[in-house]
Each structure stands twice: as C-alpha cells, then as structure tokens.
C-alpha cells in the first residue's frame, strides 16, 4: 500500500501534468507553468528514489539548480516575446 502511494500518486500527477502541457498550447505562460509542474514531480520522484536506495541527496540539489535555471530562462524568453510581440499567444509568433 505504501509503495502505491510512493510511486502511483506521482506517476498519476506526472501524467496529468503531461496532459496539461499537451493540451495548453495557446499561451506560453501556461505551457511554462505546466513544465514547472512536471519538473517538480520529477524532483519528487527523484527524491523518493534516492531516499529508498539510501543514496545522498546531492544529485537532487543539482537537479533543483538546473530546474531553477530552466525556469529563469523560460521567463526571460516570455518577457522578450511579450516585449516584441505584445502578447504570449502562439498564433502571433513566427518561426522565421
């Protein structure tokens, strides 16, 4: 029963976050928020895995550092797109 709570609940949350990421493609901000949710669930799974095997949590701190850098990069891209285009709709962006 405990193993189901350790692995089942985070997997369900990860699948729900993945579904939200795939279905929210209208605004860049909602996509960034769903990506951060996925990163937090992955951190939770990593933390559970490292604690079950009695490893050190140093790698989880590195993972958190890189996820913070990813979040800051995403926000800077969001700010630059809002400054150039005026909104965060994907329909107003051009690949070229």
Image (cartoon, rainbow, N blue to C red):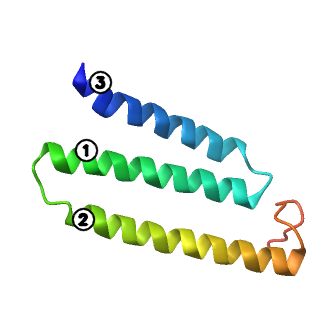
Q: N-terminal of the two: label 1 or label 3?
A: 3
The local crowd at label 2, few if under 14, some if 14 to 19, many if 20 or more residues have their Cα within 10 Å, is few
Q: Which residue is mark 1?
A: 48
**Are the residues flagged by discs 2 and 3 in contact, CB closer than 8 Å?**
no
Image location of residue 28, percent across then percent down: 73, 60
Mark 1 element type: helix
Checking the image for residue 4, the label placed there is 3
**Are the residues flagged by discs 2 and 1 in contact, CB closer than 8 Å?**
no
Quadrant in which the N terminus is drawn: top left
Q: Which residue is mark 2?
A: 59
Q: CA distance from mark 2 to mark 1?
A: 12 Å
Image location of residue 22, percent across then percent down: 66, 44
**64 w.r.t. 83: above or below:** above
Q: N-terminal of the two: label 2 or label 3?
A: 3
At 70% from the left edge and 53% from the top edge, which residue is drawn?
30
Image location of residue 92, percent across then percent down: 89, 65
Q: CA distance from mark 2 to mark 3?
A: 24 Å
**In this picture, residue 34 sits left or right of residue 85:** left
Looking at the image, how many numbered discs can be counted on the residues? 3
Q: Is residue 29 visible?
A: yes
Please tell me in which quadrant of the rendered image residue 5 appears. Answer: top left
The local crowd at label 1, few if under 14, some if 14 to 19, many if 20 or more residues have their Cα within 10 Å, is some
Mark 2 element type: helix
Q: CA distance from mark 1 to mark 3?
A: 12 Å
**80 w.r.t. 63: above or below:** below
**Are the residues flagged by discs 1 and 3 in contact, CB closer than 8 Å?**
no
Please tell me in which quadrant of the rendered image residue 8 appears. Answer: top left
Quadrant in which the C terminus is drawn: bottom right
Mark 3 element type: helix
At 14% from the left edge and 60% from the top edge, which residue is drawn?
56
């Amino acid at each position: 029963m405990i193993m189901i709570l350790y692995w089942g609940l985070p997997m369900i949350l990860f699948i729900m976050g993945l579904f939200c990421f795939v279905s929210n493609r209208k605004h860049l901000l909602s996509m960034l928020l769903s990506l951060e949710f996925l990163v937090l669930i992955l951190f939770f799974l990593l933390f559970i895995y490292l604690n079950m095997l009695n490893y050190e949590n140093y790698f989880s701190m590195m993972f958190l550092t890189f996820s913070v850098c990813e979040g800051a990069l995403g926000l800077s891209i969001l700010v630059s797109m809002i400054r150039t285009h005026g909104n965060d709709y994907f329909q107003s962006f051009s690949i070229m």
